[in-house]
Image (cartoon, coloured by chain):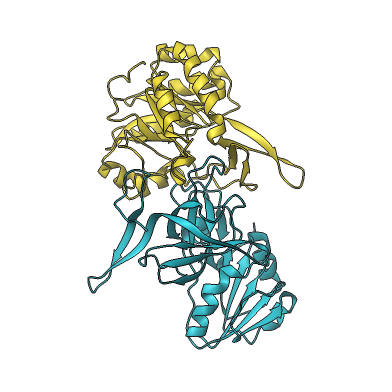
């Protein structure tokens, strides 16, 4: 992939934000790239894919990208979550826009937002409330690397899953109370709030990836992704899309 | 083309539209040309919470965005963004929302003399009639140049012909409003964004040339050629909205 300095929108690679660590090492946190969708496949019954990316791009589980094409058609950028990461490539979780084909050139900005903050624990429960498990893949991989036991609650069994991840029906999620030391939910805001009201998990670290439209990616503070929390209104695009589950309040 | 009056001169005709880039300029955010001025998100005197039914609904050629124009209120914005306005390397136009002339006059007084603030853009509510709109425009007049913003589909209304004599410095032809059904059968109304609006905004610019004010085309510009076309048709400047979140489309 060619890399050059951004000129207006004709960017191939541009570093939009960076942090300098106390050791003087610059950590790149947001990039803007032009890349190609090199692979397209079905996952959880919906289109997923792979793009080439520079190695400086390291999303945390739960962070997202805004992706758009140059073609007339989709007016707003698509919110895309990473589902896997390797040297030079990034897997994109479903659903991708149906108009995208293998070879489609994408304008990608990210990683954006606040992702999951997995504590060092022994037992991790993950729940895909809307049936899409791929958005949780980076998280279960991180939990396995930390040596944790992982239980995945879902209505749909993913096609590829490490043997170490135990799959359980979503309806049995309330039974996780007392076992899990960390709980992560992933779904729409109504789904997350409904399950929050059904679960009792005092003292358990719990987070939720709230799947909302985030068309501006934090750039416009447009407010369409506003989420009500105990600390007031927050923007999912900037303050989320992962929130402390205990902080979320009803609509 | 009518040129901007003293105090409203622009180094470049390229601007953002209110609601597209937040409350203060951020040089890290991509913008396709040198920026002539930065327009803040809409600001009201008191805080506004997000609309209960906030949503973003795509349709062929555009999308409907309904947010309720949430903002923390003028006092909080001044506290959070005032310093950044003063330090900005572009002139800041503060976009104001007001329910009454008295409320607007109070906000205007609070902004006069602030470093970095070059102009006020007064948003006219979609339901306001001509006399109410003129009363609002009059209330905003003071030390700062005033630009009135209307949905471009009101460009033919006769009351606009009185703005120049009133002392208004410019007219922004912004996003129109529309309605779409949602799955439960209700209608949701909101701002319309997208390239499908371009023929109408171009026609609106041509129509509004009669009013002898500098015109700013602020909707439907998703291709660079389209933005250049409205400039050629007589607009003194253009304001980009959701295209900033995704990059230019290619025709």
Residue A167, x across and y down, in percent = 67, 81
Q: From the viewer's perspective, tell me whether residue B145 is left or right of residue B247.
A: left
Would residue B121 be seen by someone viewing this image from the given angle?
A: no
Quadrant containing the C terminus of chain A in the rendered view: bottom right
* Residue B18: percent from left, percent from top: 45, 37
What's the colour of chain B in the image?
Answer: yellow
Identify the residue at image location x=51%, y=81%.
A143
Q: Which residue is at a point 46% across and 43% down the rendered structure image?
A: B73
Percent coordinates x, y for residue B226 in the rendering: 45, 29
Q: Is residue A206 above or below residue A106?
A: below
| Up/down of B141 relative to B57, above or below | above
Q: Is residue A40 visible?
A: yes
Left/right placement of residue B10 relative to residue A196 reads left
- State the residue in front, B60 or A191: B60
Q: Residue at point 63% right, 38% down?
A: B60
The quadrant in which the N terminus of chain A is found is: bottom left
Chain coloured cyan in the rendered structure:
A
Left or right, A83 with respect to B183, comes to left
The image quadrant that residue B153 belongs to is: top right
Q: Which percent across, then down, holds residue B202?
A: 49, 22
User: Is A141 above or below relative to A114?
Assistant: below
* Residue closest to the eye, B232 or A118: B232
Question: Going 37% across and 22% down the picture, which residue do you hit?
Answer: B236
Q: Give B171 or B99, whichever is nearer the viewer.
A: B171
Say which quarter of the image contains residue A136: bottom right
Residue A35's image quarter? bottom left
């Amino acid at each position: 992939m060619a890399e050059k300095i951004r000129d207006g929108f004709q960017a191939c690679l541009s570093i939009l934000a960076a942090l300098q660590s106390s050791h003087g090492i610059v950590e790149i946190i947001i990039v803007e790239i032009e890349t190609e969708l090199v692979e397209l496949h079905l996952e959880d019954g919906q289109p997923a894919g792979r793009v080439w990316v520079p190695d400086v791009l390291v999303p945390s589980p739960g962070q997202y990208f805004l992706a758009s094409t140059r073609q007339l058609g989709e007016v707003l950028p698509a919110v895309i979550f990473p589902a896997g990461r390797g040297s030079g490539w990034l897997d994109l979780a479903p659903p991708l826009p149906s108009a995208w084909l293998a070879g489609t050139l994408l304008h990608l900005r990210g990683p954006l937002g606040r992702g999951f903050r997995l504590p060092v624990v022994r037992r991790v429960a993950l729940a895909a409330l809307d049936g899409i498990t791929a958005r949780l893949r980076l998280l279960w991989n991180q939990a396995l690397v930390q040596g944790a036991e992982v239980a995945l609650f879902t209505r749909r069994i993913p096609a590829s899953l490490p043997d170490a991840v135990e799959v359980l029906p979503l309806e049995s999620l309330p039974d996780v109370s007392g076992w899990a030391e960390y709980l992560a939910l992933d779904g729409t805001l109504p789904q997350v709030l409904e399950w929050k009201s059904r679960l009792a998990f005092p003292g358990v670290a719990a987070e939720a990836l709230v799947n909302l439209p985030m068309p501006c990616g934090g750039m416009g503070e447009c407010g369409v992704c506003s989420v009500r929390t105990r600390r007031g209104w927050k923007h999912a695009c900037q303050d989320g899309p992962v929130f402390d589950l205990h902080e979320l309040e009803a609509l | 083309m009518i040129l901007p009056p003293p105090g409203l001169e622009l180094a470049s005709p390229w601007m953002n539209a209110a609601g597209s880039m937040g409350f203060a300029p951020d040089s890290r955010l991509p913008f396709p040309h040198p920026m002539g001025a930065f327009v803040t998100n809409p600001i009201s005197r008191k805080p506004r919470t997000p609309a209960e039914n906030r949503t973003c609904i795509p349709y062929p050629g555009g999308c409907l965005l309904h947010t309720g124009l949430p903002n923390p209120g003028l006092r909080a914005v001044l506290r959070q963004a005032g310093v950044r306005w003063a330090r900005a390397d572009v002139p800041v136009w503060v976009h104001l929302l007001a329910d009454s002339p008295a409320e607007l006059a109070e906000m205007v007084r609070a902004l006069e003399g602030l470093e970095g603030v070059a102009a006020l853009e007064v948003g006219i509510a979609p339901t306001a009639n001509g006399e109410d709109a003129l009363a609002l425009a009059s209330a905003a007049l003071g030390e700062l140049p005033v630009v009135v913003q209307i949905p471009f589909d009101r460009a033919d209304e006769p009351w606009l012909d009185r703005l120049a004599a009133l002392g208004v410095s410019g007219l922004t032809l912004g996003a129109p409003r529309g309605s779409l059904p949602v799955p439960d059968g209700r209608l949701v109304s909101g701002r319309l964004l997208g390239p499908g609006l371009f023929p109408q905004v171009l026609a609106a610019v041509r129509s509004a040339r009669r009013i002898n004010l500098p015109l700013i085309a602020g909707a439907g510009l998703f291709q660079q050629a389209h933005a250049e076309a409205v400039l050629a048709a007589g607009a003194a400047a253009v304001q980009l909205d959701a295209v900033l979140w995704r990059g230019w489309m290619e025709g």
